Amino acid sequence: MIPLVPALVVGSLGFLLGLTILFVKRGPLMILVGAEFALNSINLLFVAFSRLHKSPLGDAVVLFTIALAAVEVAIALALIFHLYRRLKIKALEELEELKG
Amino acid sequence: MAVFLFLAVVFLMSGISIIFVKEPTTNILLLLVSLTAMAGLFALYGSPFLAVVQLLVYAGAGVVLLISALFFLPRERRSPPPLRLMVPGLLWLLLLAVDIAVLLPSGRGTPSVSPLTTARLSSYLLHDLLLPFVMVSLLLVITVTALFLWTGKERGE
């Protein structure tokens, strides 16, 4: 069996990469790509721990995560279209209305 | 272990490439490559059902939605040089072949892992996790309805 440690390393590094994409990229679409990448990395940890404990709970959580990620993409794209078409905003830094 | 290393390296390298590549089209193709590599990793860890769901829902529907969003970008931003599209495209084809090889019963890389069957997972979802299952389903319905209402309002209907 493939041990747990490689999955921990790959999942954690992937999550860090996803966070880096979130912070480095400017366009809303690319920020969404970073969020998807980070979510996907965490899924590997759930699956690996699920195998370690011989319980299907981790797999069920991953199934929920995939469903919620699809919802997240739909909502985020609706918001991005709104930003592009109504407010003519191409980078999130141009968004002034939510600044405190 | 060699297949695991290959998939893990491709997954991490595609993430690093997303950071440095500027074109949105190439970035989304690289995300597709990383999602396909992750599906192979799921299969290696004994979750073939999740691997297939990952390929169909995440890599299929999710990436198609993202690509459809690209059509709202200016033409010059969504048309990178062909080589930048060829490399992730060919890598994705190779990964798909690896995923299928891992998913086939004869090609399963880790025979000591007892795969989680769909029957066991569905029974677990509908008995032990019934409340979260219903809540997530409700959330999906509410979100889709809210999006329809919102976009209708935007068009002034």
Image (cartoon, rainbow, N blue to C red):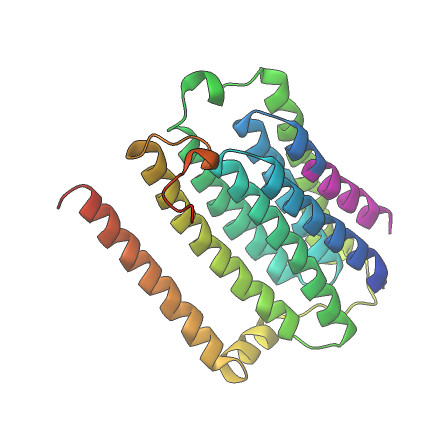
Which residue is more in the foreground, B143 or B96?
B143
For the point 87% across and 52% down, which residue is it? B1
Which secondary structure is most common in the magenta stretch?
A: helix
Which residue is more in the foreground, A99 or B151?
A99
In terms of image quadrants, where is residue A89? Answer: top left
* Quarter containing the N terminus of chain A: bottom right
Most extreme residue toward the left, as rendered? Answer: B157
For the point 42% across and 30% down, which residue is it? A90
Q: Is residue A70 above or below residue B12?
A: below
Q: Is residue A6 above or below residue B91?
A: below
For the point 75% across and 49% down, which residue is it? A13
B12 inside magenta stretch: yes
Q: Is residue B141 visible?
A: yes
Q: Is residue B109 visible?
A: no
For the point 85% across and 60% down, which residue is it? A5
B7 inside magenta stretch: yes
For the image, the number of numbered tags is 0
Q: Is residue B91 above or below residue B111?
A: above
Whole-percent x, y for residue B41 in the image: 72, 53
Whole-percent x, y for residue B80 in the image: 55, 18
Whole-percent x, y for residue B72 in the image: 37, 29
Most extreme residue toward the bottom, as rendered? Answer: B127
Whole-percent x, y for residue A52 in the image: 78, 72
In terms of image quadrants, where is residue B7? Answer: top right
Most extreme residue toward the front, as rendered? Answer: A100
Q: Which residues are magenta?
A: B1-15
Q: Is residue B44 above or below residue B101?
A: below
